[in-house]
Image (spheres, rainbow, N blue to C red):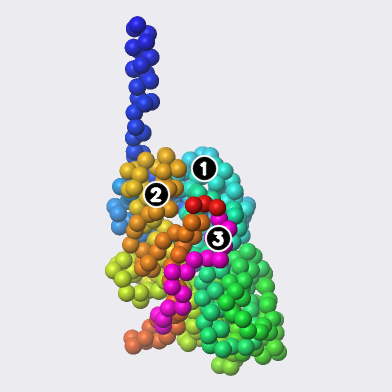
Amino acid sequence: MTRLIAAALIALPLALPAAAADKVKIGFMSTLSGPGAALGVDMRDGFNLVVKNAGGKLGGLAAEVAVVDDEQKPDTARQAVERFTKRDRVDVITGVVFSNVLLPVLPSILESGTIFISPNTGPEDYAGDKCHPRFFVASWQNEDVPGAMGQKVQDLGKKNVFLIAPNYPGGRETLNGFKRYYKGGYADEVYTKLGQLDYAAEIADIRAKKPDAVFFFLPGGMGINFIKQYASAGLAKDIPLYTPGYSADEDTIKAVGEQLVGVLNSSQWAHDLDNPANKKFVADFQKEYGRLPTMYASQSYDAALMLDAAIKAVQGKVEDKDALAKALRTAKFDSVRGKFRLNNNNYPVQDYYLREVVKDASGRITNRTVGKIFSDHGDAFASKCKMG
């Protein structure tokens, strides 16, 4: 009898409901050096701002955020993932900028049971039949922002467009998104080396082919160099540039200046969107970091808000990954972009806007929202996802 009572006492704690964790561990892996560093820095700062505003917490739990530079290299990312999943045993990984870094390591992240929240790249691979209950995108599917620009260029009646993007999954999917909605002709479709900074040959090609518009996607330092060289070549006044918002955002504006004025770009977010959450975010970001936030910062800020809401929903029990994933899928939070929800594939359904780079009344060069291109827009691959 004594042995039975002792056994019951030993077993009793195992039958009790799991207690909430005392902290949430987050692996933040991003590009913090090289030509794409500005993007990763903005995403890091946007995420950390949510944690700071909440007194170092997410969902009421102390937030332990380990930041690692992936150097925009898959091999470096693999080492970081190994550390996060096996040594640190983080609850969530986030922060990756580029799809060529994410795609090689995502299978091992998901196989480990770790949740991944993408604050930027939304690859086609996981939007359709490879959708996964522990993979979430807080930004967009890679085709969506350029798709909005494709629709606008179509509406403008352009007949012959020159396309240029880096040769990696995000670049190819960006041009695919544009082509999904633009139905005119093409002067050429050019893919450059990722990280390329000299565009003399491509600009000479544009001059020779005389398109009536150029659509480009060249993130970070690539786009900065391309725009400067394009303007210096004297092409901007005759052949207008069109781009997704991430190639005409505040980081690029700061580096390029007046040469960007007049450029139309598409985005799911803008710093002048008129909603309380966005006004607070923009004011807090400027106060904390002394600069206007970019799309990248806004997306990472929303990713942190999404995680914050999900942790609250599971009452801090982050060790229950199935429950946490379910809570992320239905997380209720005030997005800086306004309306926001996740589709059945865990990619966003949201509005997309047209922005124009302008010089405002104070002489500041920045983006101004012109109007809406898409409303409640979901990506083209969700129908292939079998998640309910």
Instruction: Tell me the residue that label 2 is attached to.
Output: 327
Q: Are marks 1 and 2 in contact (CB under 8 Å)?
A: no
Q: Earlier in the sequence, mark 1 or mark 2?
A: 1
**Residue assigned mark 1:** 113
Query: Which numbered disc covers residue 383?
Result: 3
Q: Position of residue 277 (x, y in %)?
A: 31, 66
Residue 88: image tag: none
Q: Position of residue 205 (x, y in %)?
A: 70, 85
Q: Residues within 10 Å of mark 3 (few under 14, many from 20)?
A: some
Q: Which residue is drawn at the image coordinates 37% and 18% (left, top)?
A: 10
- What amino acid type is highlighted by mark number 1? Gly
Which numbered disc, 1 or 3, marks the residue that appears first in the sequence? 1
The image shows residue 211 at horizontal and vertical percentages of 65, 88
Q: Which mark's residue is nearer the viewer, 1 or 3?
A: 3
- Local packing at callout 1 (Cα closer than 10 Å; few below 14, some 14-19, many 20+) is some
Gap between marks 3 and 2, in whole Å? 22 Å
- The span picked out in magenta is 369-385
Note whether 242 is above or below 222 in the view shown. below
